[in-house]
Image: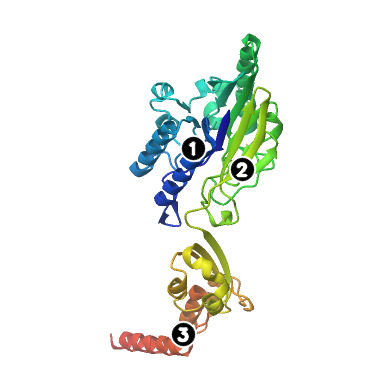
């Protein structure tokens, strides 16, 4: 049996103001190609199907189309809700969808109700844990300790009890996959993930999952192996510039009567690459080695000593999809006064106040022409005040 582990689709998300619907449609196409090429039997989506609790209509339509295409390609689907999803909305119609081979696990009441798949010589159970917000589920799970580990531990105890009962009643091997949307210990986060809590109360120990045949984790956007049978598939496309070096895609699992076999990474090249550039403006505009970045979404950090005028406009003449611009001047002396308020208090003349403001906002001193303009404006303002 072949299972494709995916997570964190975040349908409906934007990227620094740029719409991602086309890029997400591109990854859906790659997903369907993978299912057909590898004859995938089951696709897992480990949370964060949508990017927000109230997804826009285009995102809902894309997910609807994806489910239809997956079923037409011969793959069943198990999806859980993540911290970005509305569990109630994502789970609408779940009882009807099961008849069509789409299993939505979004309710705490169903966390120990597996999707059951009969295979050649064995049975596979897929348990889908929805995102478990401790404050909302602690009472139902009988948990009094704070944080995510206690609620995950309690949920997995229910899962193990059901698994044990089914194994005892079966006449063939019964294997289990558990899906969970968590921050597991040892995982490397990216900038695009929403923190689950603060103070380390969100970190779930990896040994919680190692007795299952496989743990299909979601939430962290980088593909990661925490144990042979505990992995993050990562998001299918990048959602922050911190993911510029990630390889995106999914994980293909082979299961047989002996349990988990090979785990194969499946790579899906992004429809539009990311580029993170750093340097002086003129060097970036002239460097021939940066030609590939001309077709990428770019984050650029300028290191010019003084902030160049019209920097974003000039950069976009070569890198039209520059979405983020930062300034980190190199070689510029630190101002004598640490804060703008202190600098303002130390100014002796109106011209120094205005010139200091220009320096503070632009991160470069006013040039001769700008200083002359400020002098004229101040002189006119003073003359107008005297005549009143």
Disc 3 is placed on an element classified as helix
Q: Where is the N terminus found, in terms of image quarters?
A: top right
Disc 3 vs disc 2: which is toward the camera?
Answer: 2
174 relative to 331, above or below: above
Mark before the other along the chain sequence, 1 or 3: 1
Question: What x and y, as percent, mark residue 118?
Answer: 55, 19
N-terminal label among 2 and 1: 1
Snapshot colouring: rainbow
Q: In this view, does 369 lie to the left or right of 381?
A: right
State whether residue 120 is above or below residue 7: above
The residue identified by callout 3 is: 351
Q: Quadrant of residue 313?
A: bottom left
Residue 338 in picture, x, y percent from top left = 61, 71
Q: Secondary structure beneath disc 2?
A: strand
Where is mark 2, residue-wise?
265
SS for callout 1: helix
Q: Can residue 202 be seen in this view?
A: no
Q: Residue furthest left?
A: 388
Along the polypeptide, which appears first: circle 3 or circle 2? 2
> CB atoms at circles 2 and 1 under 8 Å apart?
no
Residue 121 point in image, percent of width and height = 62, 18
Residue under label 1: 36
Left or right: 350 in relation to 386? right
Camera-side residue: 244 or 373?
244
């Amino acid at each position: 049996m072949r299972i494709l582990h995916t997570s964190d689709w975040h349908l409906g998300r934007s990227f620094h103001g740029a719409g991602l619907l086309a890029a997400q449609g591109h990854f859906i196409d790659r997903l369907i190609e993978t299912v057909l090429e590898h004859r995938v039997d089951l696709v897992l989506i480990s949370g964060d199907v949508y990017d927000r609790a109230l997804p826009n209509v285009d995102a809902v339509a894309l997910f609807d189309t994806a489910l239809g295409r997956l079923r037409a390609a011969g793959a069943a689907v198990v999806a859980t809700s993540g911290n970005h999803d509305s569990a109630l909305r994502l789970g609408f119609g779940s009882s009807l969808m099961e008849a069509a081979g789409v299993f939505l696990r979004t309710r705490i009441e169903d966390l120990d109700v597996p999707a059951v798949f009969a295979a050649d010589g064995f049975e596979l159970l897929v348990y889908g844990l929805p995102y478990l917000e401790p404050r909302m589920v602690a009472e139902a799970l009988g948990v009094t300790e704070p944080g995510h580990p206690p609620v995950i531990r309690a949920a997995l105890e229910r899962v193990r009890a059901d698994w044990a009962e089914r194994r005892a009643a079966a006449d063939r091997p019964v294997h289990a996959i558990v899906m969970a949307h968590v921050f597991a210990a040892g995982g490397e986060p990216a900038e695009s993930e929403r923190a689950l809590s603060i103070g380390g109360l969100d970190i779930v120990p990896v040994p919680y999952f190692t007795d299952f045949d496989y743990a299909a984790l979601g939430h962290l956007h980088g593909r990661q192996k925490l144990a042979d049978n505990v992995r993050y598939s990562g998001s299918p496309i990048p959602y922050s510039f911190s993911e510029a070096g990630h390889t995106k895609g999914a994980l293909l699992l082979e299961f047989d009567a002996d349990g988990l076999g090979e785990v194969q990474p499946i790579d899906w090249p992004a429809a539009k690459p990311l580029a993170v550039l750093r340097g002086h403006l003129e060097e970036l505009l002239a460097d021939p080695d940066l030609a590939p970045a001309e077709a990428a979404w770019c984050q650029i950090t300028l290191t010019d000593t003084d902030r160049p005028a019209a920097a974003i406009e000039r950069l976009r003449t070569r890198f039209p999809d520059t979405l983020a611009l930062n300034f980190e001047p190199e070689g510029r002396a630190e101002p004598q006064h640490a804060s703008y308020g202190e600098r303002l208090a130390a100014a002796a003349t109106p011209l120094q106040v205005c010139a200091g403001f220009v320096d503070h906002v632009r991160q470069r001193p006013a040039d001769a022409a700008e200083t002359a303009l400020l002098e004229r404006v101040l002189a006119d303002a003073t003359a107008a005040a005297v005549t009143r």
